[in-house]
Image: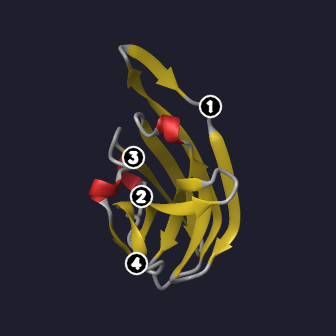
């Protein structure tokens, strides 16, 4: 029965975290973006995020945050959320689910603890700014 289920692979859709100036905090903060670098419109997009890990030997985890987008056009980006400075020491996980036509796609993206840092930036396609990417 399981062999009959075809799970399509997510291609050219990924997450990037970019540092931007915030007038509210008067400093640079990290924002997560969904990047659709494909030739397809993605619809009914759902992103669920959480952070988890250990700090000083104590297990920590954040609450789940859910974000929904009706559609994300081909070759475009959408801002998901700000990533609080205190959770950069944790694993930041984003579960992405969307449709292309009538096919359902899903993928888990994890920014490992301490990986969201200026030392690990590269140019983010479409945004053309430096950021940390997980594919």
Q: Earlier in the sequence, mark 4 or mark 2?
A: 2
Q: Which of 135/62 is in front? A: 62
What colour scheme does the image use?
secondary structure
Q: Earlier in the sequence, mark 2 or mark 3?
A: 2
Identify the residue position indicated by label 4 in the image.
125
Q: Quadrant of the C terminus?
A: bottom left
Query: Which image quadrant is residue 14 in?
Result: bottom left
Q: Kindly give the residue lying farthest to the top in the view shown.
A: 57
Sort mark 1 into few (<14), some (14-19) or many (20+) by Cα contacts within 10 Å.
few
Identify the residue position indicated by label 2 in the image.
7
> What whole-number distance in Å separates the C-alpha atoms at marks 2 and 3?
20 Å
Coordinates of residue 123 in the picture (x, y in percent): 34, 73
> What whole-number distance in Å separates the C-alpha atoms at marks 1 and 3?
16 Å
> What whole-number distance in Å separates the C-alpha atoms at marks 4 and 3?
19 Å
Q: Relative to 113, does residue 17 appear above or below in the rendering?
A: below
Coordinates of residue 72 in the picture (x, y in percent): 62, 74
Identify the residue position indicated by label 1 in the image.
63
Q: Which of 77/3 is in front? A: 77
Identify the residue position indicated by label 3 in the image.
110
Q: Quadrant of the N terminus?
A: top left
Q: Secondary structure at mark 1?
A: loop
């Amino acid at each position: 029965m399981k062999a009959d289920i075809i799970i399509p692979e997510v291609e050219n859709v990924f997450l990037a975290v970019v540092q931007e100036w915030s007038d509210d905090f008067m400093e640079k903060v990290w924002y997560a973006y969904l990047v659709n670098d494909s030739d397809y419109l993605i619809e009914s997009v759902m992103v669920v995020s959480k952070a988890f890990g250990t700090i000083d030997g104590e297990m920590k985890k954040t609450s789940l945050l859910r974000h929904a987008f009706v559609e994300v056009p081909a070759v475009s980006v959408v801002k998901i959320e700000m990533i609080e400075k205190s959770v950069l020491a944790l694993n930041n996980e984003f579960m992405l689910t969307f449709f292309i036509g009538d096919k359902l796609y899903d993928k888990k993206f994890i920014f490992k603890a301490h990986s969201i840092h200026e030392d690990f930036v590269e140019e983010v396609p479409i945004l053309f700014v430096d950021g940390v990417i997980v594919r």
